[in-house]
């Protein structure tokens, strides 16, 4: 028995030594890029290559590596994704890009689209782009809509084939006509950012993004909603349309749209000096709760900011709504008529220009604001003048002379003109002589301020309550 045990122990020790020797190659730095992957695979431990034991990469990564080095384009694409994400193998973006290139050279359309994305991010592409373009051309001839998208961008940029923006745009339009929502989004982005031979055209960009959204692309719904709120050209901004598209994407269960919609509902939105969307903290909190189901949308800090201003009953209602909510099918939300929240006088958003600690000071008034904390109707000049005067008095009482003087200066721009159309030179001279307490700025006014202007003057005054500006 003892002899048998000694033999068994010796066999186990020998196996352990063999395993240790087999694993000895793991200590070196491994290169899984196309140039060195075959050698890396060859030098892997024997037990890894034969039994799958002791591998430094997952079984899926090993299978993809084996197929990729053997020239299989699907394996090349899969290995690139694994390397890009660091799933079952060490993350290596350079190696991933190389394998995307190899797969694209063999006509893998998804790999070619990924290369286009990486190029836009400024990544160098070590691939034969002429070969990629030729392979895509074969897929385009067979009617592959994604191949049309990939080849169109290469034509527009002149990569792998002569630059031809017109032909690239036509290829994208063909894909859109055939029902590709993603091609419509590509077209929109080209017009929104511009490209070689394609000048910026925001109106066309918005139209194409809307076309993509109407084809059921929730990402385009989100993007269109964001554009309507944030586009740098004021004439393109439309909070009402932005709200409708964000709501559609949120109802279709897009967490990014739910989070953005929450921000809109938390603060409300204005078009000029007119309230378009009234703040709704319950709805804002509900959408944040729904967005937080995604591991990529941890919004606890945003929720704390909103919930600090909510009652216990409102918190319960938000929680109840979130628990009962169900996502809607995309085609269903596209057929919906999205109504805007009621914008009542008592629940209007603060102007977007009022910011920081100054905004906090006005919000502190809550449901019982002091006279200086009240939000005026910017279409009523007299009400705005009274509000600015109240802020000036508040600043005086707090020894904030700079704020008080600034506010009184804004009154000159809000006050109605002494004479509609303005005073003549002679009339102005007489008026200033007779009214020594009136500034020349006020006396020279020719027309009443618009609501947008009165709002701007009120904001310039209101921001001074904290900063002293």
Image (spheres, rainbow, N blue to C red):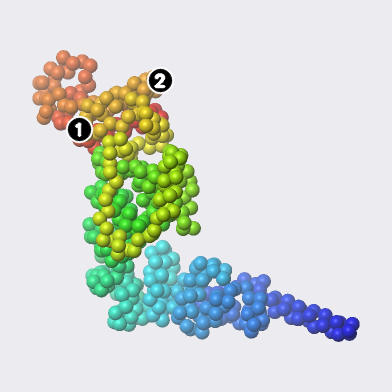
Is residue 237 among the parts visible in the rendering? Answer: no
Say which of 5 and 347 sits in front.
Answer: 347
SS assignment at label 2: loop
The quarter in which the N terminus is drawn is: bottom right
* Image position of 29 with respect to 419: above or below: below
| The label number, if any, that marks residue 449 in the structure image | 1
Residue designated by label 2:
399
Q: Quadrant of residue 46?
A: bottom right
Q: Is residue 283 left or right of residue 301?
A: left
Image point (24%, 34%), residue name: 378
Q: Which mark is residue 203?
A: none
Residue 71: x %, y % from top left:
48, 83
**Which of the marked residues, 2 or 1, is nearer the chain's N terminus?**
2
Give the image location of residue 317, x and y in percent.
41, 46
Q: Quadrant of the C terminus?
A: top left
Task: Using the numbered discs, state the Cα–Cα distance from disc 2 to disc 1 in whole angstroms.
Answer: 30 Å
């Amino acid at each position: 028995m003892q002899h048998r045990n000694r033999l068994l122990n010796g066999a186990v020790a020998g196996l352990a030594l063999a395993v240790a020797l087999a694993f000895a190659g793991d200590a070196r730095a491994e290169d899984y890029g196309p140039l060195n992957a075959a050698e890396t695979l060859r030098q892997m431990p024997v037990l890894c290559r034969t039994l799958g034991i002791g591998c430094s990469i997952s079984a899926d990564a090993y299978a993809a590596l084996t197929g990729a080095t053997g020239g299989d384009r699907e394996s090349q694409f899969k290995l690139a994704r694994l390397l890009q994400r660091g799933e079952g193998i060490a993350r290596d973006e350079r190696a991933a890009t190389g394998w995307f290139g190899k797969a694209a050279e063999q006509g893998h359309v998804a790999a070619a689209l990924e290369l286009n994305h990486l190029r836009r991010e400024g990544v160098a592409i070590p691939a034969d782009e002429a070969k990629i373009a030729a392979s895509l051309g074969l897929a385009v001839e067979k009617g592959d809509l994604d191949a049309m998208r990939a080849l169109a961008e290469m034509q527009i940029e002149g990569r792998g084939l002569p630059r031809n923006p017109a032909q690239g745009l036509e290829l994208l339009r063909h894909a859109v006509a055939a029902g590709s929502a993603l091609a419509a989004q590509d077209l929109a982005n080209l017009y929104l950012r511009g490209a070689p031979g394609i000048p910026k055209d925001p109106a066309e960009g918005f139209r194409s993004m809307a076309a993509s959204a109407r084809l059921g692309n929730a990402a385009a719904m989100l993007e269109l909603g964001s554009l309507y709120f944030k586009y740098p050209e004021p004439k393109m901004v439309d909070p009402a349309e932005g709200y409708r598209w964000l709501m559609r994407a949120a109802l279709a269960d897009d967490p990014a749209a739910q989070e953005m919609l929450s921000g809109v509902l938390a603060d409300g939105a204005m078009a000029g000096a007119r309230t378009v969307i009234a703040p709704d903290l319950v709805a804002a909190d509900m959408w944040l709760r729904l967005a937080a189901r995604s591991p990529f949308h941890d919004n606890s800090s945003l929720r704390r900011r909103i919930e600090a201003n909510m009652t216990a009953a409102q918190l319960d209602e938000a929680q109840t709504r979130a628990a009962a909510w169900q996502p809607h099918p995309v085609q269903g939300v596209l057929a919906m008529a999205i109504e805007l929240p009621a914008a009542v006088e008592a629940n209007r958003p603060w102007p977007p220009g009022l910011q920081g600690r100054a905004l906090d000071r006005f919000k502190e008034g809550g449901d019982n604001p002091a006279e200086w904390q009240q939000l005026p109707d910017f279409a009523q000049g007299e009400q705005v003048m009274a509000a600015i005067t109240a802020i000036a008095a508040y600043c005086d009482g707090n020894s904030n002379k700079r704020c008080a003087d600034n506010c009184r200066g804004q009154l000159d721009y809000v006050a109605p003109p002494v004479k509609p159309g303005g005073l003549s030179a002679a009339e102005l001279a007489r008026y200033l002589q007779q009214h020594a307490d009136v500034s020349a700025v006020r006396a020279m006014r020719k027309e009443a301020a618009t609501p947008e202007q009165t709002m701007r003057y009120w904001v310039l005054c209101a921001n001074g309550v904290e900063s002293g500006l």
